Image (spheres, helix red, strand yellow):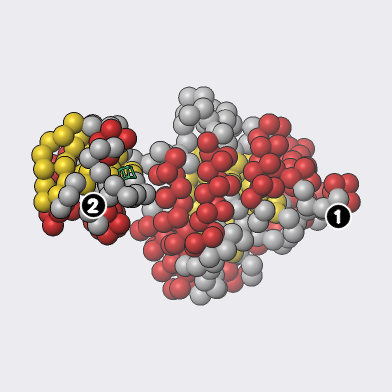
Amino acid sequence: MDRRITRLVQVGDVTLGYDGKTNGKIAVQSMTNTDTEIKEKTADQIKRLEDMGCDIIRFTVNTPKAAKNVEYYKSISRVPLVADIHFDYRLALEAAEGGIDKIRINPGNIGSRDRVETLVQVCKDRKIPIRIGVNSGSVEKELLKKYGGATAEALAESALGHAKILEECDFFDTVISIKSSNVQTMIKANRLVAEKCNYPLHIGVTEAGTVGGGLVKSAVGIGSLLCDGIGDTLRVSLTDDPTVEIEAANKILNAIGFLERPNIVSCPTCGRTKIDLISIAKEVERRIEKMNIHKSMKIAVMGCVVNGPGEAQDADIGIAGGVGEAVLFKKGVLIRKISEENIVDELIGELEKMI
Ligand code: SF4
């Protein structure tokens, strides 16, 4: 899959972007939802996010006390941390002093040029990148008027306007994010900005909702962009515990083939199905998830021998149901018959030999 060429931006030990040679990981991000003034609660959530595989963790730095805690959070975290700051550049300066790895702030909202220059100088000295974060609620009044609302064009122009302020201060260590709760707007805005600059893009559908609908919206929005080669880091924003966002992000990345993980394919069942394929597929999924396999492989769970092995001939391993039994196959070639009650155990047993 072709990937958009970007500048590389270093966030702690995570490289964002793709310059044609260095292929930065598409980093999964989430944001803590604890009060960042309370160290224990926030530290606990940072640890849980790390354990889930979160690559970069953001938290709000909304008070001087929260900014003072940055140093502590850095001391306990194994992944890069991002300070989320609105308007108050002094909090950004304090977070920088605490060793933060990235700052999310919109330079157009800081106030005078002096303040922007002060912040930029600190970020340059400490090699801290800045993420510009634009959403439907942050678009400037003039742009809303010019485009008749928070359209994709307005969002893109707003983001590029903030980036220009940094460029005027000779600062290019920038990541841009444009989010909207409208999936089509988010996709279009990111495509527009991807054409007009070479900054890495942080992508996501904002206010996507709870996990059911939110995952679908995010999969469409994030997935469409990634399939275009656009997107260098992402967040699946869900109304849930932040760790759920990591699970959802990994599902999206795995569906596109960006992760070294198993990909389970199972047929929708039809009148030909003579085994309880729905229960079998769910059990296979549960057992494979528990195995925590870090290897790309396709595993097929198909309802019938007539079409199953042929339809899933590229599967590394699979089963196809018969009457009260199933066949085990690899790359479309039948290996042996198995009785219905042993289908899952036999499949898992064979799989264990392959990893
Ligand atoms: S694999 Fe067989 S059982 Fe499954 S949907 Fe296709 S024809 Fe039906």
Q: Nearer the viewer, residue 338 or 120?
A: 338
Mark 1: which secondary structure?
Answer: helix
Q: Name the residue at 64% across, 67% down.
A: 62
Q: Is label 1 in contact with label 2 (beta carbons under 8 Å)?
A: no
Residue 85 x, y percent position in the rendering: 65, 60
Q: Name the residue at 67% across, 53% down.
A: 182
Q: Quadrant of residue 299?
A: top left
- Of labels 1 and 2, the one closer to you: 2
Q: Name the residue at 44% across, 67% down.
A: 45
| Three-letter code, disc 1 | Lys
Give the mark nearest the N terminus, 1 or 2: 1
Q: Quadrant of residue 83?
A: bottom right
Label for residue 141?
A: 1
Residue found farthest to the top:
20
Residue 132 vertical position relative to residue 16 in the rendered view, above or below: below
* Residue matched to label 2: 274
